[in-house]
Amino acid sequence: MAMSTKGGVSLYRFYDAEDTLLYVGITEAGAMRWNQHRKSKHWWPEVVSSTVEHFTTRAEALEAERQAIIAEQPLHNVVHNRTRQPDRSEELVWTCVKCGRPIPDGDGYIEVDVNAAIEAIEARCRREAELRSRRPDGLLIMSGGDLLGWPDDESWHAIHRACDTDPVSAPYWFDVDRARTLLQVLDWTLHLSEKSWLDGTNWSAFVYRAVTGLRGAA
Ligand SMILES: [Zn+2]
């Protein structure tokens, strides 16, 4: 799915329910870039509104972004300074999506529904084609509303074997014992990056939450 980089550069602002500015960023390839944010930014579930400004050149957009970050102090543009650095020897705790309790070795697995992930990618392609068809030049230009209405990724989850009473249609899974260290998770990430359906899932956000010990919304 090739994204056009023509048509200028957009500056986005994302706000939460209290109208707090969460993040400012620019993109030349709207949908793809912000879809990455949805996957990798733990604050994405807090976003309830956004604004977008278009610029002709990247230099103009970068300058506007710089000024906005200084003047408006978005909460998460400095997130890297505040994120807890995990201890490399620390074991990851996987929490069951059903009962909310930690999953000991041998008692559960991490899984995703591959069919649903493929459907998520297809839904995005349909939505992209729809947005492009609205414009005579066929460019992908998204409003803040388009962005918030973008189809969701399929969620990975960890679950106890005993809690899994409603199996998914096409599960891809591995035991929690095989994802206890950062090196193991890196290994899974490299392995999964070869799967065509990974882009239809929230793997980055899922791993981010486990690694930083954050307990955000799924
Ligand atoms: Zn459970």
Image: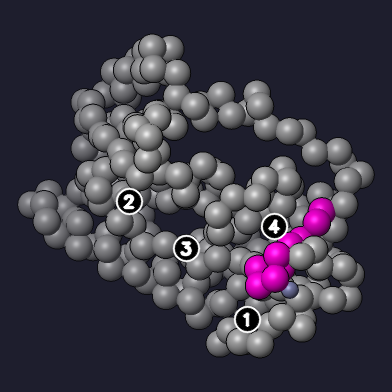
Q: Residue at x 40, y 43 (%)?
A: 47
* Apparent side of residue 192 relative to residue 93 in the rendered image (left or right): left
Q: Which residues are magenta?
A: 92-100
In three-dimensional space, the C-alpha distance between marks 3 and 1, rounded to whole angstroms, equals 15 Å
Q: Indicate which disc, 2 or 3, sits on the residue closer to the N terminus.
A: 2
* 38 and 99: which is toward the camera: 99
Q: Indicate which disc, 1 or 2, sits on the residue closer to the N terminus.
A: 2
User: Toward which corner of the image does residue 202 lie, by quadrant?
Assistant: bottom right
Disc 3 Cβ-to-ligand 1 distance below 8 Å: no
| Image coords of residue 160 (percent x, y) | 76, 76
Location of the N terminus (image quadrant): bottom left
In three-dimensional space, the C-alpha distance between marks 3 and 4, rounded to whole angstroms, equals 17 Å
- From this view, report whether residue 76 is shown above or below residue 139: above
Q: Main secondary structure of the magenta part?
A: loop
Residue holding disc 1 = 171
In three-dimensional space, the C-alpha distance between marks 1 and 2, rounded to whole angstroms, equals 28 Å
- From this view, report whether residue 73 is shown above or below residue 44: above
Residue 189, labelled with which disc? 4
- From this view, report whether residue 97 is shown above or below residue 143: below
In three-dimensional space, the C-alpha distance between marks 4 and 1, rounded to whole angstroms, equals 17 Å
In three-dimensional space, the C-alpha distance between marks 4 and 2, rounded to whole angstroms, equals 27 Å
Residue holding disc 3 = 153
Q: Is residue 173 magenta?
A: no
